[in-house]
């Protein structure tokens, strides 16, 4: 679990920093632990094989804690903030899939793919707050759309935003347990860590003629049928796999 790896990185980095400061004992090192510890944490994170998006978290975690401690806030505020973050970034805490929000450019490109595919149904694995499924539902009112999201707060926002949109079904579920056999198009914006598992799930469940569209991250063991490059600042790509 990535959360436990991250916690181990922070603790080990703190131990290494304390050891280094104790051994050196000079004024320079006594004034730099808040700089040294994040660097150690990043190094350990890479050694533990964590995804790159953990780097800024490790870099800013201890400095952020130090800044907050200077404010002398009541203890309950820390618990409330921690609980809120867990409810938002549920996938990050429980596994390897962070909360990624897709841009409008992704939704527009996916609309073109859906039109060419003449898709009758689509599922978004990890729909977040609905940045993909809501524009699609408005453009294709006859298409049946399923939005699967497990994190509590994004799911609540997604459910509220989809109220009254009759062709979207919102499910609070683990998408790994959700069957894919009845969908024309499967859309996913996940993490490099889980792409092999996603490929295996699609091989086992998708019917002939179905299409997997993976935003940003390609499958590791298969060449895509086509790749759509988006005209956006992030230069994103949609990797399409025909089954």
Image (spheres, rainbow, N blue to C red):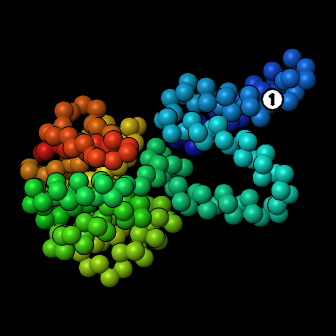
Screen quadrant of the C terminus? top left
Query: Does residue 201 appear anywhere in the picture?
Result: no
Q: Quadrant of residue 47?
A: top right
Residue 14, relative to residue 121: is it above or below? Answer: above
Q: Is residue 123 left or right of residue 4?
A: left
Q: Is residue 190 left or right of residue 157?
A: left
Residue 153, relative to residue 231: is it above or below? Answer: below
- Find residue 156 and report its horizontal and vertical position in percent: 47, 71
Q: Which residue is mark 1?
A: 32
Q: Is residue 182 left or right of residue 18?
A: left
Q: Residue at x 58, y 57 (%)?
A: 86
Q: Residue at x 79, y 45 (%)?
A: 66
- Find residue 50 and report its horizontal and vertical position in percent: 51, 33
Q: Residue at x 82, y 61 (%)?
A: 73
Residue 189, relative to residue 40: is it above or below? Answer: below
- Find residue 161 and report its horizontal and vertical position in percent: 40, 74
From this viewpoint, which residue is outermost toward the top?
24
Q: Quadrant of residue 132?
A: bottom left
Q: Residue at x 51, y 39 (%)?
A: 53
Front-lying residue, 95 or 34:
34
Q: Quadrant of residue 143?
A: bottom left
Question: What secondary structure is marked by label 1?
Answer: loop
């Amino acid at each position: 679990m990535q959360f436990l790896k991250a916690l181990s990185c922070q603790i080990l980095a703190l131990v290494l920093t304390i050891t280094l400061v104790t051994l050196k004992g000079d004024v320079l090192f006594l004034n730099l632990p808040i700089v040294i510890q994040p660097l150690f944490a990043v190094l350990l994170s890479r050694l533990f094989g964590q995804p790159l998006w953990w780097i800024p978290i490790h870099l800013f975690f201890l400095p952020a804690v130090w800044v907050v401690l200077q404010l002398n806030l009541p203890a309950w505020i820390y618990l409330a903030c921690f609980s809120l973050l867990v409810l938002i970034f549920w996938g990050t805490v429980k596994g390897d899939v962070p909360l990624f929000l897709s841009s409008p450019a992704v939704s527009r490109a996916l609309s073109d793919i859906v039109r060419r595919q003449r898709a009758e149904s689509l599922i978004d694995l990890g729909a977040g707050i609905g940045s993909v499924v809501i524009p699609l539902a408005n453009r294709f009112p006859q298409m049946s759309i399923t939005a699967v999201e497990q994190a509590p707060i994004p799911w609540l926002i997604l459910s509220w935003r989809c109220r009254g949109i009759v062709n979207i079904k919102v499910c609070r579920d683990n998408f790994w347990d959700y069957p894919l056999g009845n969908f024309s198009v499967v859309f996913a914006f996940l993490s490099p860590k889980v792409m092999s598992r996603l490929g295996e799930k699609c091989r086992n469940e998708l019917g002939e003629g179905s299409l997997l569209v993976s935003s940003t991250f390609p499958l590791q063991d298969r060449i895509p049928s086509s790749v759509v490059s988006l005209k956006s600042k992030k230069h994103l790509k949609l990797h399409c796999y025909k089954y």
